[in-house]
Amino acid sequence: MKLAIDGGKPVRDDFLFYHRSSVGQEELDEIADTFRSGWLTTGPKTALFEKRFGDFLGAPYVVGLNSCTAGLHLGLVTLGVGEGDEVITTPITFPSTANVIEHQRAKTVFVDVDPDTLLMDAALFEQAISPRTKAVIPVHLAGLPCDMRAIMAVAEEHGVQVVEDCAHAIESKIAGRHCGTFGAVGAFSFYATKNITSGEGGAVCVATAELRDECLALRLHGLTKDAWKRYDKGGFAHYECVAPGYKYNMMDVQAAMLLHQLDRLEGFASRRREIVSTYDAAFCDKPELRLLGTRDGVEHAHHIYPVLLQLERLSCDRDQFLNAMQAENIGVAVHFRALHLHPYYVARYGFERGAFPDAERAGESLVSLPLYPALTNDDVETVIAAVEKIIANYRRQ
Ligand SMILES: Cc1ncc(COP(=O)(O)O)c(C=O)c1O
């Protein structure tokens, strides 16, 4: 069958977006209620969401923010990471995981990923520890939890602080315990494509009341009182600036959405699982594809559905595959190309190809397929049909 990219008929007539958020009337009504209240930014709805998200995670100290990046950054700031320190992470991640290390003028130390799961390998983490190592940021990529038992054991032995990147891991658990509650800090994302969303948004879950109080001040310029409390009807209270903080606060408009997104999460998760099993069944025996490994005893958030193209079996490269998918009217994405080979990190640290071979191999062969609750079974079938058509076309004989 001729590929659409070569002038053939695409597998579907309309374009299937890589992602579409599922937002309903309840979110709209709650936003309208926020508008009518006359208070749009951080206030009672943010406080309610923090409580509800903390209950969901089984953790008492949650602070609502405007992004996961803000949470990762506040984690490093509150744990005292600064100039001369080293922070360890993995290169198969979104740039902000490491950018926040750079914001603190600390050194980013990458370690290669486990080739099966693309997660941090606790043994490689341990080998990378130096007297300057202050923190580690394991990334629960795609929603599969890292081996936090092993990572925490190494971290505790060497006095290294742990900041979990939970951008993909809202529902992820290990032996019933939520990711984000193992380290001192866990940072979550509610960006438009995430498992629950407020368009932009994030939250941080921290281990102590002290860290929570620092995050509360630092998310709003380092002020002692948040704006909502300043303007309510109690006695007038001046704010004081106790630290040069940031503008990282969550708005009540965002919290309004998230309160209802959280209610929908179980339904979203079960639809994600159905789609994942349909994809798995279709792709597991295709020698041109490799599915990411999983781990026993964990709950996977299935945030994204990445496949690794087995390029030695195909006559195309990953980008040709992506273009062929788009031409078939299927939106695709890449999570992620290896971060150490992006221009900033090459310029800053002089990384060359070969530094982290497993991350590089994955970074050149990963493709993420659409995975979101609004996909119909027919949509899923067209994704599978497009993948099969393209593989058949480029299969090496
Ligand atoms: C692994 C990872 N970490 C951090 C982030 C940053 O999240 P946010 O956009 O909420 O700052 C993302 C965003 O996609 C991500 O994928």
Image (cartoon, rainbow, N blue to C red):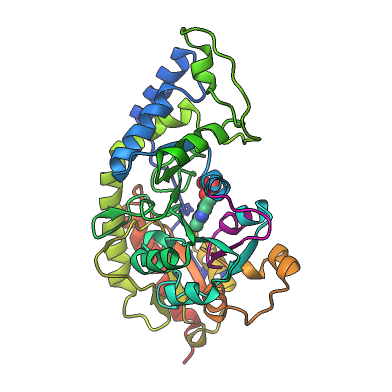
Image vertical order of residue 360 relative to residue 332, above or below:
below
218 vs 8, nearest the viewer: 218
Image vertical order of residue 27 relative to residue 276, above or below:
above
89 vs 388, nearest the viewer: 89
Q: Is residue 6 visible?
A: no
281 vs 69, nearest the viewer: 69
Residue visible at 24% across and 55% down in the picture: 176
Q: How many marks?
A: 0
Residue visible at 49% across and 39% down in the picture: 201
Q: Is residue 263 visible?
A: yes
Q: Is residue 379 magenta?
A: no
346 vs 319, nearest the viewer: 346
Query: Residue 17's x, y, as percent?
Result: 48, 52
Part of the protein shown in magenta:
79-99
Does residue 295 appear to the left or right of 319 in the view shown? left
Question: Residue 196 falls in which quadrant of the image?
Answer: top left
The quadrant of the image that shows the N terminus is bottom left
Image vertical order of residue 48 relative to residue 324, above or below:
above
Query: Residue 29's x, y, as percent?
Result: 37, 22
- Extreme residue toward the right, this view: 347
Q: Is residue 87 magenta?
A: yes
Residue visible at 49% across and 72% down in the picture: 125
Does residue 244 appear to the left or right of 201 in the view shown? right
Image vertical order of residue 288 relative to residue 84, above or below:
below
Query: Residue 48's x, y, as percent?
Result: 36, 28
Query: Residue 179's x, y, as percent?
Result: 36, 54
Question: Residue 128 falls in which quadrant of the image?
Answer: bottom right
Does residue 356 appear to the left or right of 211 in the view shown? right
